[in-house]
Image: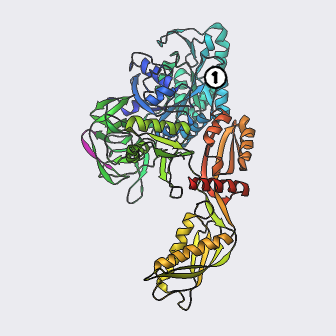
Amino acid sequence: MGTYPTEKIRNLGIVAHGGAGKTSLAEAILFNTGMIDRLGRVDDGTSTMDFEPEEIKRKISITSSFDHCEWQAHSIHFVDTPGYGDFIGDTRACMRSLDCAVVILSAISGVKVQTEEVWAWANEFEIPRIAFVNKMDKERASFLRAIDDMETSLGARGVAIQMPIGAEDNFEGVIDLIRMKACKYAKDGSGKCEETAIPADLQEEAQRLREHMVEIVAEAYDALTEKYLENGELSEEEILDGLRVGTMRNTFTPVLCGSATQNIGVTQLLAAVCDFLPSPLDRTRAVGTHPKTKELIDRGPDEKEPFSALVFKTTSDPYTGKITVFRIYSGTLNSDSTIYNSTKGTEERIGQIYELEGKKQKPVKQAFAGDIVAVAKLKETVTGDTLCDPNNPIIYEQARQLLPVISYAIEPKTKADEDKIHNALHRMIEEEPTLESHRDTQTKEFIISGLGQVHLDVIVEKMKRKFNVEVLLKTPKVPYFETIRGSAKVQGKYKKQSGGKGQYGDCWIELSPTGRGDGYIFEDKIVGGVIPRQYIPAVDKGIQEAAADGFLADYPVVDFRVALYDGSFHTVDSSEMAFKVAGSMAFKKAMEQCKPVLLEPIVNLTVTVPDENMGDVIGDLNSRRGKVVGVEPKAHSQSIKAVVPMSEVLAYSNDLKSMTSDRGLFSTEFSHYEEVPTHLAQKVIAEAQASKKE
């Protein structure tokens, strides 16, 4: 057993939309628990948890950071997660491995769309949570409005277990509705408070909220309901027990309040984490599958069970190298040991085990079920892999990654950068599983895709800082295709005589369109040996190569059928090369007669926006040649489904942010190809021809 028994461990995520105050709360937690001796600030670039240069520059959390603290004989491992849409994929990966969460609600802006996302993920992973209404010291702060917004936007049942004393500049503390005591805080950020009686002008409201709280808590389980119905009241112990049971079952969500930057209400929040949120023992046993038999296996948070863990984050440290962060679900892990990566089917050597403290690493000799720890320099292991006892293999399901929404063509600045770019991208994708890269075989560009413009900008900055690789981002070319609408029968004849052996190939083909998506079909209709068997594949190859080069604008020709039905040959001068050239000539000649047209990729677009932005977004989609196919109402938001040409949404991420004040989310998925309208096709063809001349 570790320093703390498993029932005293809390694996906690601090989640919300960007700017709600997650990092400031984490800073206050560390300060109040003695882990740091000075309260850092995000705006000053002095916070413990936002330590990456890119985070300090932008004053936002870009990557999840980890720390731990001790409070009331509990060990709390907590994760400060990103809340901005460009980086929220990291939050999802972390939530898969956490037991509980504090969801921050802004007393000013309430619930934003990213909060809706993380709340939905908490439901998906069945994570019990409590809510903290932050920024009670700011202008227009309202505690009850934040709870109402939480209930309507998130479909949650909030139960206030505190109420604020004052608001905005007059905010000075909180009233504990369980014990019916007031706590007034010093305004120096020390977190020190004085317990007093409830101010006379707040007693009536406190009593009303307490009665409402007791009514809801009484529904936690049947025996408590009966007790409440009999007596009309519950004891302090019964309220605490009901709050814990109801929170663990996600029947309701306790709501507290405070100010992270003023360090008000944070110690009460820590107590609520210990009192109401689950330990690893309170969670269901972790379920996985056997790598070979695929049968279901489960593991419990017991050091006597076989070791198993899930990797949920990978980072690159300039000094330590690759750092792998994982949650141990069962068993014990020792330094200097060998474990099995069941996902990859390879063994990994474990050196030193670390607890993460912001950007620092604290060495530990052992780690136990329920712990979140890190190790350095694993060779094969990446995010999503399962580590386990070689004799008792298991594979845990990893969190489904968010799909990229924006793509850019990436090119190195210099030849030296070109040599290093692939390794740098590989390392960045290990850190950022939501990042994707591939070479477009059609446009010949190297494409990098992420969750937003800022996401990709940060990736470029990290590549330069960590791997000394400088790259440029450019709008990618649209992968158009060409096809035909008509049919033609033509001859392709190649005859060359210049002394010595000549070249002779002659073929007749019929070129005709097929259904969309049918690709290329070649039919051999030669009879009587007018073209010898050995030359027929050469005709096919010549046609394929000519089709790859395009006809209108150098884009590949697709969805056509070629029937080779006649031709002639020369016993001496014919060759595979001659018939390949003849096939190419026939194809180009036929294209002139077959009404060639340009095809463009169409994507399915799903956009989630606040109610007030729906009209603007639909109007904008119409202007992009989009077709809205459905609208699904949600609480305070609308999910719009549309089909839109890819060329119209290459920069949609930035445009949507502008339209919705960064409150919109979207995803795209390739759907099909459609013919480009004539006036736009002429423009694309002209641009392609101009580019070719250059």
* Residue 257 vertical placement versus 596 (above, below): above
Residue lying at 58% horizontally and 38% vertically, measured from the top left: 117
The rendered magenta stretch, by its main secondary structure, is classed as strand
Residue 236: image quadrant is top right
At label 1, counting other C-alpha atoms closer than 10 Å, the crowd grade (few under 14, some 14-19, many 20 or more) is many
Q: Amino acid at mark 1?
A: Ile
The x and y percentages for residue 132 are 56, 25
Residue 40 x %, y %: 45, 18
Residue 338 lies in the magenta-colored region: yes
Q: Determine the residue positioned at 53% across, 90% down.
A: 529
Query: Where residue 545 sits: x, y (%)?
Result: 52, 68
- In the visual, does 314 lie left or right of 449? left
- Count of numbered tags: 1
Q: Quadrant of residue 454?
A: top right
User: Which residue is label 1 attached to?
Assistant: 108
Rendered view: 162 above or below 388? above
Whether residue 204 is situated above or below residue 91 in the rendered picture: above
Q: Going by the picture, which residue comes out furthest to the front?
A: 499
Q: Is residue 370 visible?
A: no
Residue at far bottom of view: 528
Q: Secondary structure at mark 1?
A: loop
Q: Which residue occupies the foreground of this view, 579 or 556?
A: 579
- Is 165 on the left-hand or right-hand side of 424? right
Picture coordinates of residue 197, whole percent (x, y): 57, 8
Q: Is residue 121 visible?
A: yes
Horizontally, residue 228 falls left or right of residue 283, namely right
In terms of depth relative to the viewer, which is nearer, 342 or 511? 511
The residue lying toward the viewer, choosing from 214 and 628, is 628
Residue 585's image quarter? bottom right
* Vertical arrangement, residue 253 with respect to residue 520, above or below: above
Q: What's drawn in magenta, residue-wise?
A: 334-340
